[in-house]
Image (spheres, rainbow, N blue to C red):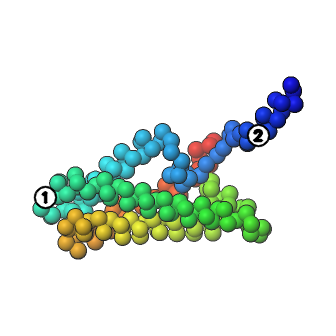
Amino acid sequence: MRSSRRESRRHRGPALYNVLFPVWLVVWLPSWLWLLLIPANYLIDRIVLWWGLKGVDGRGDLCRRHTWKVCLAGFAADFVGSALLLACFLACDPIGADWAPDFSYALCFNPFLHPLALSVTVGAIALSGVLIYVLDGVVLRKAGIEKDMAKRAALRLAFVTAPYLFLLPSALLYR
């Protein structure tokens, strides 16, 4: 009887009790935080879009109909930025260089501890910002906004809503 218990325990797989996640990985994991992040993100996008479309006739209606598309484009851009960070983190293990453990720790928990981790994190934020600019520009042009106004609004959205939280040291949350 005892051996069957051991066998069943072995086949269950690993149990993760205390897992620490980097802030940028939260985007990939559905959780109750999304109940806060999605409305907050929508509200910020709505405010910045309203500001970016200053002088456009019917901007209230445009904001009402297209903010959700801008919000989705922002989440897609954030996923790409966090995917870059995840890929860099996963690529560290096979490298085996002396600097790799320090870099991977800094990348996950405090990018300010390693210059390369900070550079990669800033690069991921910039990549997300560029994607926000491009995707929001497409959304706004399809909405009928003239090209210059769409560029200006997309640029404001990119600067204000880029995922600066990637820089937040996760170590602060786990103390």
Q: Is residue 125 above or below residue 38?
A: below
Displayed quadrant of residue 67: bottom left
Q: Is mark 2 on a helix, strand or loop?
A: helix
Question: Within 10 angstroms of label 2, few (less than 14), some, or many (20 or more) residues?
Answer: few
Task: Choose between 146 and 161: the one closer to the eye.
Answer: 146
- Return the x and y of residue 80 as percentages of the image width and height: 49, 63
97 or 94: nearer the eye? 94
Residue found farthest to the bottom: 148
Badge 2 amino acid: His
Looking at the image, can residue 104 be seen?
Answer: yes
User: Which of the numbered marks, if any, corresponds to residue 58?
Assistant: 1
Q: Position of residue 157 (x, y in %)?
A: 33, 62
User: Residue at point 57% right, 68% down?
Assistant: 120
- The residue tagged 2 is 11
- In the image, 31: left or right of 156? right
Q: In this picture, is 61 found above or below 36?
A: below
Residue appearing at x 82%, y 29% in the figure: 5
Query: Along the horizontal axis of the image, is 11 left or right of 43?
Result: right
Across and down, in percent, residue 21 comes to 61, 48
Q: In this view, does 157 lie to the left or right of 82?
A: left
Q: Nearer the viewer, mark 2 or mark 1?
A: 2
Q: Evaluate whether residue 137 shows in this view.
A: no
Find the residue positioned furthest to the top: 1
Q: How many numbered discs, if any?
A: 2
Please identify the quadrant where the C terminus is shown.
top right
Q: In which quarter of the image is residue 159?
A: bottom left
Say what secondary structure mark 1 lies in.
Answer: loop
Residue at image point 53% right, 52% down = 28
Give the mark nearer the N terminus: 2 vs 1. Answer: 2
